[in-house]
Image: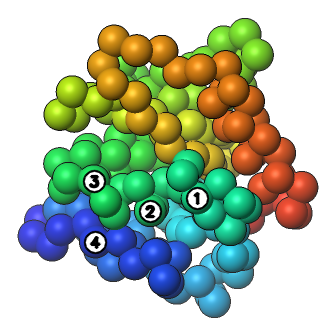
């Protein structure tokens, strides 16, 4: 275990350290060598899936930005989030999460949710799998336990994804 907390560096668009859950972090924050665009925050490499987080703030949706919201969240939420992301990326497509990773249906078919409960709140991280190679984390929403998200919130998730997708093709190996 590395023993370091996950600390966001929004000004750099990356995380300083991977949460202390795995002894050998696969997190790469070298944006130049990866060719990462400003609307993508990070990539995890050498897994079944690469991972990228959309910078929703740059796309005009700051209240939905994953890293901004995680940086203002308690450390247990950050640790749980990265543990789920690591597990999905390493074990895809065999990953079974017991409620932490859910496929969406209806108008949101093709999207996935990372679901985390913490301090009476339900935290939702919306994702897509791109070409079976990239886990794209699109945005973050939070709601009190027992409440539903509004249809306009789901529409914004789709809108953020469409804006990022229009930028250019996704980075792949």
Task: Look at the numbered discs 1 and 2 and tell me whether their residues touch, using CB distance below 8 Å.
Answer: yes
Q: Nearer the viewer, mark 1 or mark 3?
A: 1
Viewer-proximal residue among 127 and 51: 127
**Is residue 100 in view from this perspective?**
yes
* Earlier residue among tags 1 and 2: 1
Separation of residues labelled 2 and 4 (CA atoms): 11 Å
Horizontally, is 69 left or right of 169 in the view? Answer: left
SS of the residue under disc 1: helix
Separation of residues labelled 1 and 3 (CA atoms): 15 Å
Separation of residues labelled 3 and 4 (CA atoms): 10 Å
* Earlier residue among tags 3 and 4: 4
Quarter of the image for the C terminus: give it: bottom right
Task: Residue 7: give its label.
Answer: 4
Q: Nearer the viewer, mark 3 or mark 4?
A: 3
**Is residue 23 in view from this perspective?**
no
Q: Residues within 10 Å of mark 4 (few under 14, many from 20)?
A: some
* Earlier residue among tags 3 and 2: 2
SS of the residue under disc 3: loop
Separation of residues labelled 1 and 2 (CA atoms): 8 Å
Identify which residue is drawn at 40% across, 78% down: 9
Residue 69 falls in image quadrant:
bottom left
Task: Residue 68: give its label.
Answer: 2
* Earlier residue among tags 1 and 3: 1
Task: Look at the numbered discs 1 and 4 and tell me whether their residues touch, using CB distance below 8 Å.
Answer: no
Separation of residues labelled 1 and 4 (CA atoms): 19 Å
Task: Look at the numbered discs 3 and 2 and tell me whether their residues touch, using CB distance below 8 Å.
Answer: no
Q: Kindly identify which residue carries mark 3.
A: 73
Q: Kindly identify which residue carries mark 1.
A: 62
């Amino acid at each position: 275990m590395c023993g370091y907390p996950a600390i966001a560096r929004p000004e750099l668009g990356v995380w300083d350290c991977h949460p202390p859950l795995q002894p050998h972090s696969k997190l790469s924050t070298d944006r130049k060598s990866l060719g990462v665009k400003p609307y993508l925050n990070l990539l995890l490499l050498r897994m079944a899936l690469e991972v990228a987080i959309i910078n929703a703030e740059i796309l005009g949706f700051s209240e939905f930005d994953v890293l901004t919201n995680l940086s203002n969240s308690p450390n247990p939420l950050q640790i749980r989030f990265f543990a789920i992301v690591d597990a999905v990326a390493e074990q895809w497509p065999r990953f079974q999460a017991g409620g932490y990773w859910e496929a969406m249906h209806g108008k949101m078919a093709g999207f996935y949710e990372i679901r985390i409960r913490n301090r009476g709140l339900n935290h939702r991280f919306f994702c897509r799998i791109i070409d079976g190679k990239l886990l794209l984390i699109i945005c973050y929403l939070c709601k009190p336990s027992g409440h539903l998200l509004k249809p306009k919130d789901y529409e914004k998730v789709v809108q953020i994804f469409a804006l990022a997708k229009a930028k250019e093709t996704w980075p792949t190996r």
